[in-house]
Image: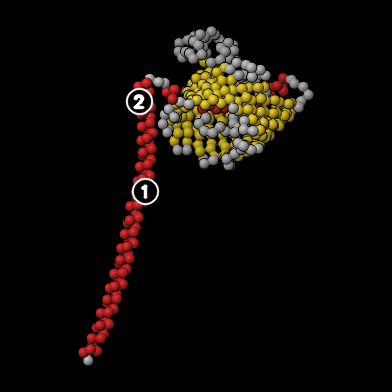
Amino acid sequence: MVSEKFEPLGLVVDKLKCFTKSTQEFANGVLHNIGLSRRRRPVEILKRLQREAFSDIMKLRDRQDKVERLISFKSSKVSPLDQTSTRVKGEVEVLGLLLMIDRIHEENQEAIRKTGIKTGINSKFTFETTIRETDTLKAEFVASNKAQLDALTSPLSLSKVVFDAKINEWYSLTTVLLGARCSDLLKHDVITSGPSLLNQHIGSGVSLSVRKNNIIASLAQFVSLQEPHLYPNYLTTFGQVVYQLSGSTKLLLMGLRQLPKDLGQDPSLGPMGLPIGIFRPDRGTNRVTNHPFGSTALVLESELDSSTRVGGWVEMNDSDTDAPLKWGVSVSDLPEDDFGWGVRVGGSVFERFEVEVFSKMNLGEKLILQPSFVYVADGLNKFPALMMKSSWSF
């Protein structure tokens, strides 16, 4: 009877032992997994610290190189230009035009002038020097700025000097000593087709640009000194705002304001001198224009892939010699090493319409041929034309 009473108690003890053993095994498994996760976490932390340390070491190395160059410059008194490399690029451009009209008269010539097509031969040499890794100095020499046939034998003349300095990751300063155009102040990729104010000559001056996230804003002040007996000298203010809508689409708003500045009939201050005094008598003048004028443009352009672009622009101005509202649309596919094509359509409202269809062919690595068909309708003057443009770079 006693043994029968103890048998149920033994079964209970055995079950308790089995339960205790299974509980211990479960706890060991949980603790083992926690230990593995704790061991993995320090490994991830070490990898992250290693990446951050490598980045800091590279920054310190760059700073050390800059300090060593500065110390060597102060000790040897050598110009920073002696430690820079200069890249030289040359380009020869030939442009011919075949007009399909019966005769040339004044109205046709004015319509051709508005297209901006300048036939002839032009050669250009560009010297670009990098200073302090982030700053560049560019000088441009041309053999002819009037598209003459003797451009290959004409002497070179200095046409443009641009110094672009990057102050920090937000600010940059562009100084143009000679031959500035509004297109030289663009702080982004050159657009395929744009408003005419980008080709406006604005002389010499300074531009300050601010970059923050996906917005770039620039403000520039320039002075253009021309022949005082024929044209006024302009003080030009140019501003632009670039907004990157997405990775491949950008919106540009730009404006230009020019104020004539009377320097007198016979100024002798040289090309870089400009009086700004207000106590000067008001002299009569027979110049072309003596009132301020300006232009505003809105540009939208998108890159569909590495070589295909679609864009459009609208320009408004208050000039007496130009249309008050102009527009343009362009589509192009221009790969670097393959056949390319493009279409440009534009004009002014109710006055002018122009369309150009062109192709691009690479003959080797340096020679490019670009045949195109142009149709112009300017009032009562309507004519087609064939144009051939070839450029050789070296």
Question: Which residue is at a point 59% across and 33% down the rendered structure image?
Answer: 192
Kind of residue at disc 1: Lys
Mark 2, secondary structure of its residue: helix
* Placement of the N terminus among the 4 image quadrants: bottom left
- The residue at 23%/86% (across/down) is 6
Disc sitting over residue 222 in the figure: none
Q: Is residue 120 left or right of residue 156?
A: right
Q: Residue furthest right?
A: 102
- Graded by Cα atoms within 10 Å as few (under 14), some (14 to 19) or many (20 or more), the crowding at tag 1 reads few
**Which disc, if any, is residue 71?**
2
In the rendered image, residue 154, in percent from the top left (x then y), is placed at: 62, 16
Q: Name the residue: 53% across, 37% down.
A: 250
Q: Nearer the viewer, residue 107 or 57?
A: 57
* Vertical order, 363 against 153 (above or below): below
Which quarter of the rendering shows the C terminus?
top right
> As drawn, which residue projects farthest toward the left?
2
At 56% from the left edge and 20% from the top edge, which residue is drawn?
141
Secondary structure at numbered mark 1? helix
- Coloring scheme used: secondary structure
Observer-nearest residue: 238 or 52? 52
Residue linked to disc 1: 47
Q: Nearer the viewer, residue 171 or 45?
A: 45
222 relative to 240, above or below: above
* Mark 1 vs 2, N-terminal side: 1
